């Protein structure tokens, strides 16, 4: 990797961390470059605009998130794969952001308010996960596995958002458990709330 490529990667990683923490609209280019140990003038050697940086940063956090969600699940397929991803997502560790945090619950609502172009940045992330799920279920109808993958994402993201709004750990855990149980039912592997592992 060249020096220029390493510098660009540092800017993207720094921006990704700041955007996840504060939201893209609340972080200026000066803040990003200063946090990366660089000057504002150097920004335009790597990006044409802040939008280009936001796109690169979101792509970075999305790929990181997908890797965290699907890593180590090579032996899982079909519904088992979706359940494993869903339970990993709807965990207390993910709730508190250790050691990673999906960008959808934290910056999704803010980006949604920025208009159709900004919202389109999320489409590749959703489509990428749907594609991974399809590859994991080669003998299942593509339409069915896509519907299951999208349903899993909607349940998982919604569950995390609601759990993070809870004022007590007990209520947050109850929400996560209920979402996991719903996920099992929706994917055809019904278990009671008390039987779903944390």
Image (cartoon, rainbow, N blue to C red):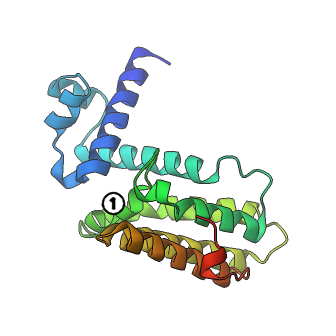
Viewer can see residue 18: yes
Residue sticking out furthest to the top: 3
Callout count: 1
Q: Is residue 70 left or right of residue 26?
A: right
Nearest the eye: 38 or 78: 78
Quarter holding the C terminus? Answer: bottom right
Residue sticking out furthest to the right: 139
Q: Is residue 160 left or right of residue 78?
A: left
Residue 157: x %, y % from top left: 46, 69
Residue that numbered label 1 is attached to = 106
Viewer can see residue 51: no
Image vertical order of residue 125 relative to residue 34, above or below:
below
Q: Is residue 104 left or right of residue 128?
A: left
Q: Residue at x 48, y 59 (%)?
A: 92
Image vertical order of residue 171 relative to residue 132, above or below:
below
Image quarter of residue 28: top left
Q: Residue at x 34, y 64 (%)?
A: 108
Residue 183: x %, y % from top left: 61, 77
Q: Residue at x 56, y 64 (%)?
A: 127
Image vertical order of residue 114 relative to residue 177, above or below:
above
Image quarter of residue 136: bottom right
Tell me if mark 1 has few (under 14), some (14-19) or many (20+) residues whose alpha carbon lies within 10 angstroms of its own: some
Image quarter of residue 162: bottom left
What element does badge 1 sit on? helix
Residue 68: x %, y % from top left: 56, 48
Nearest the eye: 75 or 9: 75
Q: Residue at x 39, y 44 (%)?
A: 56
Image vertical order of residue 106 relative to residue 155, above or below:
above
């Amino acid at each position: 990797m060249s020096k220029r490529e390493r510098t660009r990667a540092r800017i993207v990683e720094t921006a990704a961390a700041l955007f996840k923490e504060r939201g893209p609209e609340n972080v200026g280019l000066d803040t990003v470059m200063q946090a990366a140990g660089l000057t504002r003038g150097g920004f335009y050697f790597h990006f044409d605009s802040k939008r280009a940086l936001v796109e690169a940063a979101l792509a970075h956090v999305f790929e990181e998130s997908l890797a965290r969600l699907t890593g180590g699940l090579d032996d899982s397929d079909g519904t088992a794969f979706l359940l494993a991803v869903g339970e990993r997502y709807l965990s207390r560790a993910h709730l508190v952001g250790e050691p990673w945090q999906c960008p959808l619950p934290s910056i999704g609502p803010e980006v949604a308010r920025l208009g159709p172009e900004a919202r389109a940045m999320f489409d590749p992330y959703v489509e990428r996960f749907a594609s991974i799920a399809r590859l994991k279920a080669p003998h299942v109808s593509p339409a069915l596995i896509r519907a299951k993958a999208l349903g899993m994402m909607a349940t998982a993201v919604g569950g995390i958002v609601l759990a993070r709004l809870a004022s007590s750990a007990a209520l947050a855990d109850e929400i996560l458990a209920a979402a996991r149980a719903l996920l099992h039912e929706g994917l055809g592997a019904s278990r009671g709330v008390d039987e779903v592992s944390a």
